[in-house]
Amino acid sequence: MKQLAINGGTPIAAGQFIETKWPPVCEATAEKIKQLYLSREWSFNSAKEQEFEQAFAAYHGAKHGIFMTNGTVTLECALTVLGVGPGDEVIVPGLTWIATAAAVKYVGAKVVFADIDPMTAALDPAAFEAQITPRTKAVIPVHLYGGMADLDQIIAIAQKHHLAVIEDCAHMQGGKWRDRGVGSWGDVGSFSFQQSKTLSGGESGICLTNDDKLAELLYRTKHIGYSRYDQQGQAGTPPPPELLCHNYRGLAFSAQILLDQLDGLPAIIDRYNAFTDRLRELTRDIAGFRTQAPGRMASPQGYYAYGLIFDGPEWDGIPRTRIAQAIRSEGVLGVNGTYGPVYKHLLFNLREEDYRNSGCPITERLSERMLVLMHWHMNHLANADALASAIRKISDNRKELCEC
Ligand SMILES: Cc1ncc(COP(=O)(O)O)c(C=O)c1O
């Protein structure tokens, strides 16, 4: 008789898994949004935006925060102010959301993909160094899902080769490396607050930096050339002529939502770390299965999602989509595939470009063998128990899934 729920068996986690809706909502914030609306201070470097910029930068140990429309333009602006443009190369990991690589295209530079570390799923320092050429101008390590890029090694390599470092922290709000926030280690840190993120303002993003000059240029780049100290609508002081500026301003409403969420961030991070500790412990002996490793110096690790890796020979011949379906059938929500190798995306294979064989075997392997659990399902320890029992049951009965 078949055991797995996908084949008609009884779901093992039925009634055990607790669903969380995301993004979170709160009456007190709704009231503040109403007051903000009535105040007419909706944008243009409003007090609320400044308050959030300062609070978020301080949380992550950075001197400046520059609030923007989303976490793609933050990357684009970071590249712009670091002088990256046509003729330059920028190294990005093979596994990331498409925006990391698209931002490089937006400034007219060439994307070069480097492989990832098999444990953290973030940029592999050795693979990064191997891709450096005389045209390389910058690197964008991504702190991906529930893993941090090795900032010590990546920054040391970048310094040796005089490269700029832009940390893509879209997945890592509140994560710290050696007790200091991610995003404060490179030249610029870029964050996204899109609706599914750990802190979510609907849309919006922020750049962090410790460099006064970069902060001023970032501000001008997102505010159509105005300095932070100029009056909107007045002549102001002109930006450097070579700086291409945009309107990438954020909204005070998002800043208000984020400010309120920021208060609760340490508790969220604690819960997510407790969840991953428990899941790791409960699944330690499951053959061929492992969980994504946190950053080597994470203190604490932040999470946008958590990597579940089925890469032992026991799982050969079982597609990851089938494993994901089987987990969902057992009553566990929020388990999906990864982004997949970004260099295979159509955007990077148009006209004369062909990135399909970018030589990133670990990116290919993890894209095939890793699933990710979305962060808001990690709010309850009971869900770690439910997920662990689902994975164990599937492992014990995996022959039922085999397509070999
Ligand atoms: C790794 C990564 N970088 C950048 C972005 C871009 O952020 P946004 O969607 O706010 O433009 C995202 C968004 O999901 C992301 O996951």
Image: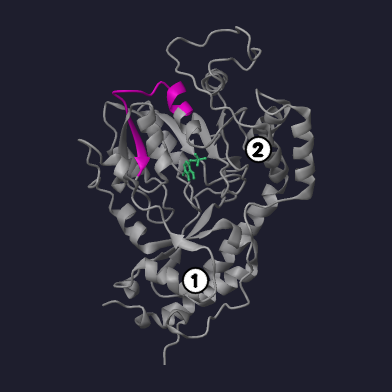
Residue 226: percent from the left, percent from the top?
A: 58, 15
For image coordinates 37% across by 39% down, the residue present is 92
For image coordinates 52% across by 66% down, the residue present is 280
Magenta residue span: 77-93
Residue 80 included in the magenta stretch of the image: yes
Residue projecting furthest to the bottom: 1
Work out which quarter of the rendered image holds the C terminus and state it: bottom left
Nearer to the camera, 307 or 28: 28
Does residue 218 show up? yes
Question: To which quarter of the image does residue 371 belong?
Answer: bottom left
**Label drawn at residue 328:** 1
**For residue 172, above or below residue 370:** above
Mark 1 and mark 2 lie on one chain; the one further toward the N terminus is: 2
Q: Which residue is mark 2?
A: 254
Question: To which quarter of the image does residue 32 belong?
Answer: top right
Nearer to the camera, 146 or 17: 17
Amino acid at dot 2: Ser
**For residue 13, above or below residue 56:** below
Residue projecting furthest to the left: 352
